[in-house]
Amino acid sequence: MIIKVFEKNILDAAAVYMDSWKESHKNICSAEFIEKHDLEYMQNFLLEKLSSAYQIYIKYCGDVPVGIIAINPDDEEICLM
């Protein structure tokens, strides 16, 4: 199931984004920098994007959040995968 991200499910989206971001950056960023990108950081980052009119969606497999995608309102670019 794919649904739109709102404040009520932002923690699920932040957790998925945090895990994937840390995995994709582990070989190019310092461990200290990666650790700063915790759940609270990612939640605030996504809330900022929502307030900037980004459309963010989350994919669930059953009850498990497995991915997010966002659309930038300025150029309709797909981002935050």
Image: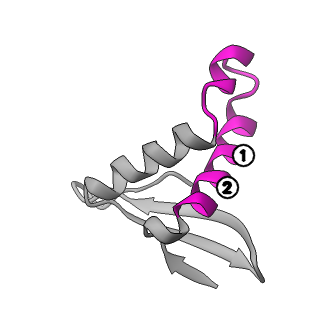
Q: Residue at x 44, y 43 (%)?
A: 45
User: Which residue is labeled 1 in the image?
Assistant: 19
Provide the secondary structure element on which disc 1 rests. helix
From the top left corner, tell me how far across and down residue 64 is, in percent: 77, 72
Indicate the quadrant where residue 6 lies: bottom left
Which disc is residue 53 wearing? none
Contact, mark 2 vs mark 1 (Cβ under 8 Å)? yes
From the top left corner, tell me how far across and down residue 18 is, in percent: 65, 44
How many neighbours does mark 1 have within 10 angstroms: few (below 14), some (14-19), or many (20 or more)? some
From the top left corner, tell me how far across and down residue 77 is, in percent: 36, 57
Q: Residue at x 28, y 55 (%)?
A: 51
Q: Is residue 49 left or right of residue 37?
A: left
- Please determine whether, in this image, residue 80 is positioned above or below residue 23: below
User: Which residue is labeled 2 in the image?
Assistant: 16
Q: How is the image coloured?
A: one colour
The dominant secondary structure in magenta is helix
From the top left corner, tell me how far across and down residue 34 is, in percent: 67, 25
- Please determine whether, in this image, residue 15 is positioned above or below residue 28: below
Q: Give the magenta range.
A: 10-38
